[in-house]
Amino acid sequence: MNLRSIDLNLLVILDALLDEAHVSRAAQRLNLSQPAVSSALQRCRHLFGDELLDRGKGGMQRTPRGDALRAPLKSVLAGVLDLLAPGDIPLRDVERTVRITTADHPAAMMTGPLLEALRQSAPGVTAIIQPWHGSDAAIAALMNGDADLAISVFMSEPEDIMRVTLLQETYVVAMRKGHPAEGQLDLDTWLAWPHVTVSGRGDQRTPVDAQLAGMGLSRRVGLVVPTFQLVPDLLTRTDFLALLPSHSFAWQKDGSLVSATPPIAVDGFPLHLAWHRRQNGDQVLSHVTSTIRQIFRGIAAG
């Protein structure tokens, strides 16, 4: 293939088409007419020898080849932008949106301090905290360019995904102030009270339950909720107990909850910040990443 025959603008249109899987939305995003985008799609199909987008139930769907092109296409376009960039722009003059996909308890700890820090250093940067659909979906969003940063537990590090540890979480047992178990939480007492557990998939059994089963023990799970943020209010109104990440618990400042060390060893977890390798030269994203790391260093230090 002769590179002189490739129109860079065609790749920009293809990027929007593969993101949107919809000609009209891609046209609107690019401020182009629908016929122009439809024509570009036909040229892309000829260029790549594939339909790229097929019409199916509910609208257009990416073909396997179209799906496979998303991440490398974004890397190519990002490289072109880096090549043409005029150099570093003062952060206070930057107008930019940064999309962060994160689980709920990191978002609760980070969002306020991040917005305040950006207001001071880069007021034109808008942060979008995206809904959380699990770590696999977050990695896919980074690969496909649907998110700029992701915060959660990423036990594997796929090729082209960069990952740093923000802090190491441990678990505490949380309960309402004045709970009968306050100050005397041994194993029997812990097992005697009903528990709230957190599972984004609605799982009633967790690794803790498997650990207890190995000891010939069990606990009564009375409620399963999808996010940690729902737990504190539930605890203040009931005699339920819950395992909460220690740094998340530290942000409960109204004194309505107390904590205790779990009566069995409960594995903690690392909290990671991840991004795609193609973003390494991005001045704004580097600043946001550095700011987030600084925020979590402060949280880890207490």
Image: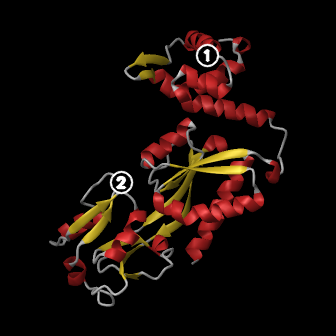
| Residue at the disc numbered 2 | 200
Residue 87: x %, y % from top left: 84, 42
Q: Would you say 232 lies left or right of 189 here? A: right
**Mark carried by residue 185:** none
Residue 218 drawn at (x, y percent): 18, 70
Q: Secondary structure at mark 1?
A: helix
- In the figure, is residue 213 to the left or right of 231? left
Q: Is residue 280 visible?
A: no
Q: Say what secondary structure mark 2 lies in.
A: loop
Residue placed at 23% from the left, 67% from the top?
Answer: 222
Residue 151 in view (yes/no): yes
- Distance between mark 2 and mark 1 Cα atoms: 39 Å
Residues 61 and 30: in front is 30
Amino acid type at mark 2: Gly
Task: Please tell me the numbered disc located at residue 34.
Answer: 1
> Which residue is located at x 18 percent, y 67 percent?
213
- Mark 1 crowd level (few <14, some 14–19, many ≥20, 10 Å Cα): some
Residue lying at 43% horizontally and 16% vertically, measured from the top left: 55
